Amino acid sequence: MARPETLVLAGYGINCEEETAHAFELAGSGTRIVHINDLIADKKMLRNFNIFVFPGGFSYGDDTGSGLALANRIKNNMLDDLAAFIDRDTLMLGICNGFQVMVNIGVVPGLLNAGLFTGNAEAALEHNNTNRYQCRWVDLLVDTKSPSVFTRGIERLHVPVAHGEGNFFAPAGIMKAIDEGSLACMKYAGPAGGPADGEFPYNPNGSMNDIAALSDRSGRIMGMMPHPERGIAFTQRDDWPRLKAEMERRGSAIPVFSDGMEIFRNGVNYFK
Amino acid sequence: MEKAKFRIEVYYKSSDPRGQTLRRRLTMLGFGVDALFITDNYLINADISIEDAGRCAAILKQPVTQDFLVNSPYDPGDFDYALEIGFLPGVTDNVAHTVRESLEDLLAVSLDYEKSIYTSFTYFIKGGLTMDDAVLIGRELHNPLIQRIKILSRNSYVHEMGMGMDIPVVSISENPTVSEVEINLPEADLLELGRNGIPDLDGTRRGPLALDLASLQAIRNYYNNIEKRRPTDIELESIAQTWSEHCKHTIFAADMDDDVKGGIYRKYIKEATLRIRRDKGDKDFCLSVFSDNAGGIDFDDDYIIADKVETHNSPSALDPFGGSITGIVGVNRDIIGFGLGSKPVANRYGFCFSDPFHDRPLYRSRDRESRLLPSRRIMEGVIRGVNAGGNQSGIPTPQGFVYFDERYRGKPLVFVGTLGLMPKIVNGRNMVMKKAMPGDNIVVIGGRVGRDGIHGATFSSEALSSGSPASAVQIGDPITQKKLSDAVVKEARDLGLYNSITDNGAGGLSCSVAEMARESGGFEVDLEKIPLKYPGLSPWQIWVSESQERMTLSIPDVNLGKFLSLMNRRGVHGVSIGRFNGSDRGTVRLNGEVIFSLDMKFLHDGLPQKHLKTTYIKRENPEHVFPQPGDMNGIYGEMLERMNLCSYEFISTQYDHEVQGNSVIKPLQGKGRVNGNVSVIRPVAGSMKGVILSQGLYPSYSEIDPYGMAACSIDTAVRNVISAGGTMEKIALLDNFCWCDSNNPERLGQLKEAASACYDYSVAYGTPFISGKDSMFNDFKGYDSGFNEVFISVPPTLLISSLGIMEDISLAVSIDIKFSGDLIYILGLTGSRIGGSEYLAHVSGKAVGIEPLTGNLPEVDAALNAKLYRAYEKGVRMGLISSGISIERGGLGIAAAKSSVAGMLGFSIDLSKAPVKDDVRDDIILFSESQGRLLVTVDPVKQGDFESLMKGNSFGLLGHVSAGGRVEVFGRDGKLIIDTDVRRLSDAYRKTFREF
């Protein structure tokens, strides 16, 4: 198969569907933005897609807890269909609020019940330890041992975060399994290049073990707090004016794309 | 109070990050809090089984970290006091709406829209606290105008089995009928009717109609001579809304003195735009100005950019969070309703507060309970409101400012703006043209109608303290609006399902329906079709209610089913409430009976033309004489710490400016993360074109010279756009006048001065006004701590917002200096006039605005400046400018510090190289706010090209970027007057709001 088809979920306060679909299109995927109500009314349409995306946003206003109400909606209406989708050789990506939804339906890290998708959460994304929304650029360190399809060939990324609840928490047993399986595929990095070690603002939310993204064991499912779709073009970077000036004075070419693009290319290339 | 059937309490099994943060904050405020736990409570008032209540509770908790209890009070063990905070009856509870939807989905049942779910929080606090302390903490945590609080000691909490099951159900016992109003009254009684409203049967009045005698007489004549009957209450309330200052801008439309016929708006604002458009000829870029909900300009061949800036001041004074969130989602709706529907692509904000570090107690009445919220609470609440509204709506909020002056203690100013993007043509249809056609259905979509915001802007403290069940305060609901916005702008618009659309803002349906009916002729509405939040509303209340998140559309029969079905599938409530027609009359029926029948021409044009007299005479100010301070190092640091000059990063980082992926020049620039005064966005991902956003605002100048104040504001707004890479060919302006005491002829005279400068300078720069809004009575009348009467007016405040279109965003200029050895130039002339400046306020040892300042304002030479700006523009295109910053508040010294801190590189400059107008002292060269100036850095290899480009303009090579972090400033006599480093500048710049 050459060209995968990507379903990008929308509705009820999801708000990053357009730029996320744009990123997948640039990477070479066919994309369709589908309202959650239309999907629930016609769940069979999932068969037509290879990649399922929970984009960022504020589904249901984050009322009662981020991602919780949308996770409940999915659990009440289409758990089996999503399980069937995952059972095929497909990919699933959740970004920011989408990651929060995925954690709440238990699709990442997906360790218990022999990896069967039961809809039970195993971890949480809590309020930032600053108790404030944080919109800022961060550096991410990729765990190259991780099974994630999405981070293949990437070592570091410079992308933005924007969330109020991204503080990853998991009980000790789960955390141990995450470590052993190298499932924490991206971690917040400090200024020296190593892990941020919990230090604000490098770790912007207080996440345990600086966890910024989580893969399931198959590597086909990933949730991440940062927004790669907001860092696909060079001029989206926070440091582009300085980088551009440096490149000009060195006489080197100015790039068109930026780090976030690699996540989407990896997703699309999986099907090549 | 009614009781709930089930009470669910959700608590954290281990630690709650929210509780820890709140404990730290309370400790900082001086409360000895050792531990703090929070529960989220959900009260269910529905006929479900205990098993189902348990299932509901299970989905309301985070599965891993939280647990729940049903009808059994949570007890964290060791605590002294428990404080429960929930809403008052009728206050919008967004969380409750989400919970209702989730429970309906889970149980497959339908629950009552408004009274099935209520939410609250309980705070369990431990520390050596007394009940008095608990009450004070309660004051910090809640706002009595919208929330109820219950405080129990541990003993009572245990003894009473928790907080109980009370729920704030709205119950209105009034008789919901229509009444006739007697208007053939003696003058005094007529005035009373205008001032305090229609009398109810018990003699109390319904709240101000805000109609003056001339208006009331015009209404009386209309009913006596044309209708030959008495008005109904719904008619009178509707006329009052339509004719209000808020809707008709009566002061801006009034004749003034002998020289302003037809109003200062027409003479100075609209006329300027007309003239600029004529002068520009085929380069005119205005596409829709002054006629729609926002102003629209040409972006490229395919798209229009719309912009609108609003204020929401009075509501924000009372409920800072509710006021500002309602403001931001309200102005979003102006954009959604621009043309046939535009997509919001960026928000703007601007806040004017008093000093949050020093609270000056003020009271609305002679009553300790009527105390205004402290300055800090107002600031925090307003900032949080735009955070919630902007972030939840998925609209980036890159551009804004915060400004402090003690005269904003009585009333803060809350500016909120939104830019929108709309295709010019969809399926062959011009998207700017909207016209409700006779026969079209009047369709309302979005939220339901309650008593929210009735007599919106005029609610009084009496009305609020009388226990009125449904509060006049509104709280915006971004998610309801987001659903509506997506359904309209991303789907219905492009299916061509409707002929016209507008926002329901001030005056509610009474204004939106009547306004759209101008396009068709008339309208007829069946009031009983309007969906309500709760029963008991009077017909007039339904008609004028400002319940939020609603829009009105005009839909032909052939599309109605398709439209309503689409809305239904998107979770948006929509209903047809009547029809537009060509009858020249507006008609409202209630269950078939006509209760409102008005001539449309009278409704829209019957308002008598006002004639106002003004008396302002410009004062001659003595210059403030003071010696140059000895310790300029110290002064430099202190200036950077000033609230109006320092970092407000804590606001920028809590507003999502990256959503939609359109950010180019961000609110924080460079490695050093400095707040720039301009942002750039790229609204269409496939195009390299960009939109530049900025503003100019100088409230401290107004009392010295309102004309000069407006001139400086326009020059700054234009120059800022230029600094980031804009072009003089394509800059548009928006005006927001926030005036005070506008019945006072002297204030009106200041207004006229400022407005005439708007004409002169917008024409001189060729930068048309495309939209504007005014708010004329920003005054506080009340009492100080000794219960002496006080009257506090905001300084006359004019916000000039600017937007420019740039061809290629990859040429955008940032403020951070980038390379050691780069040359530093100042462009433009520096003069010695420093009246109203931050520096003068600083050396006078006063907070801005404590008393009128002395001195004169910098003059603005538009022709000279425009020439310089065009040269700079060319320099950007030629790639000669390595960094560029517009010099505004705080002058050269502050601009240099910001560029330096942003780049984390030092500099060395010589003030004798700055071109000056007259004999200017070193400290004045550093901090004068002379207009028309920019500070740039240039690669030394481009020195020749840059200097020949600038030939014919005033500019000076001040020095260079240092190799390390050292910062040196040499005075005119060659002496080193400032010797510091970038690290220290950075610390000073960040110090003031570090704890926020």
Image: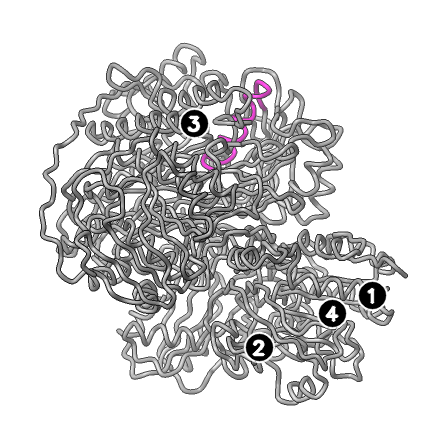
Is B515 part of what is drawn in magenta? yes
Colour scheme of the picture: one colour
Query: How far apart, in angstroms, are the residues tagged by discs 3 and 2?
Result: 63 Å
Residue under label 2, please give it: B68
- Kind of residue at badge 3: Gly
Residues flagged by tags 4 and 2 on a common chain: no
- Closer-to-camera residue (B63/B494): B494
Residue at the disc numbered 4: A150
Q: Which quarter of the picture shows residue B285?
A: top right
Distance of label 1 from label 4 (alpha carbons): 23 Å
Q: Residues within 10 Å of mark 1 (few under 14, many from 20)?
A: some
Dominant SS in magenta: helix
Residue drawn 44% across the image and 41% down it: B721
Kind of residue at disc 2:
Phe
Instruction: Give the chain letter at badge 1.
Output: A
Asked if both marks, 1 and 4, belong to the same chain, the answer given is yes
Instruction: Evaluate whether residue B363 shows in this view.
Output: yes
Q: Secondary structure at mark 3?
A: loop
Above or below residue B517? Residue B97 is: below
Q: Residues within 10 Å of mark 3 (few under 14, many from 20)?
A: many
Return the x and y of residue B678 as percentages of the image width and height: 44, 47
The front one of B313 and A215 is: A215
Q: CA distance from mark 4 to mark 2?
A: 37 Å
Q: Quadrant of the C terminus of chain B?
A: bottom left
Give me the disc on residue B766. 3
Q: Which residues are magenta?
A: B505-523
Residue at the (48%, 51%) spot, across then down: B398
**Residue type at mark 4?**
Phe
Query: Mark 3 vs mark 2: which is more N-terminal?
Result: 2
Counting other residues with Cα less than 10 Å from the Cα at mark 2, is it few (<14), some (14-19), or many (20 or more)? many
Q: Are marks 1 and 2 on the same chain?
A: no
Circle 1 SS class: helix
